[in-house]
Structure formats: C-alpha cells, structure tokens
Amino acid sequence: MEDPNQQKGENGEKCIGGAWKQAIKVSYEATKLAFPGGEVIAHLDHKSFKGWQKNAITSFLTEENIKIGKPQDFF
C-alpha cells in the first residue's frame, strides 16, 4: 500500500496505490477454492496497520462483501 499523501488520483484526489486490492482478491478466491463450502472470514490485526490502511482495507472488504471477523469469531 502506498501512502495516499504521496499519490494523487485523476481528479487531484488522494489515492492509495499499490497492488493491495488485487492481493486481497487473490487470497480470498484461493481460500474459497481450498475450502469449498466453508465460510471465509477476514481478520485484520489492527496493530499491524496504520489507521488509513485499516480504513481502506475495511472499506474494500465491505465493498467486496467479504465478512470481517474478530478473534472470537474463529473459535
């Protein structure tokens, strides 16, 4: 993920560059194929991300209808 303060989009808006969306999509699809019929849930370790990264990932996962779970959801 590239810092949005360093990137400008087409309209001069800040944008988050990098291949992070593609990485999430590929990982999600690979996990679905590996566990047919299973429920795939994403978990974000909040200490591993800056606030803008967490917000971008959470928004993207919501747009893609990928459920976000908390640690207790996995047990």
Image (cartoon, rainbow, N blue to C red):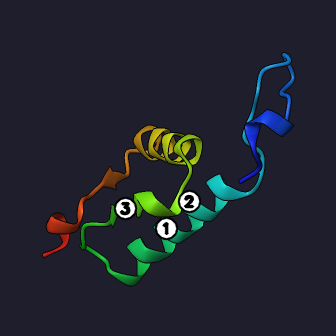
SS class, disc 2 = helix
SS class, disc 1 = helix
First reached walking from the N terminus: tag 2 or tag 3? 2
Discs 1, 2 touching: Cβ within 8 Å: yes
In space, the residues marked 2 and 3 are separated at their CA atoms by: 11 Å
Is 56 drawn above or below residue 49 in the view shown? above
Residue 25 in the image: x percent, y percent?
56, 59
Residue reaching furthest bottom?
Answer: 34
Residue corresponding to mark 1: 29
Quarter of the figure with the N terminus: bottom right
Residue 61 in the image: x percent, y percent?
45, 47
Which residue: 73% across, 57% down? 19
Which residue: 51% across, 43% down? 60
Discs 1, 3 touching: Cβ within 8 Å: no
SS class, disc 3 = strand
Residue reaching furthest top?
Answer: 11
In space, the residues marked 1 and 3 are separated at their CA atoms by: 12 Å
Side (left or right) of 39 relative to 25: left
Q: What residue type is labelled 1?
A: Glu
Q: What residue type is labelled 2?
A: Lys
Side (left or right) of 75 relative to 7: left
Q: Which amino acid does label 3 sit on?
A: Ala
In space, the residues marked 1 and 2 are separated at their CA atoms by: 6 Å
Residue corresponding to mark 2: 25
Residue corresponding to mark 3: 42
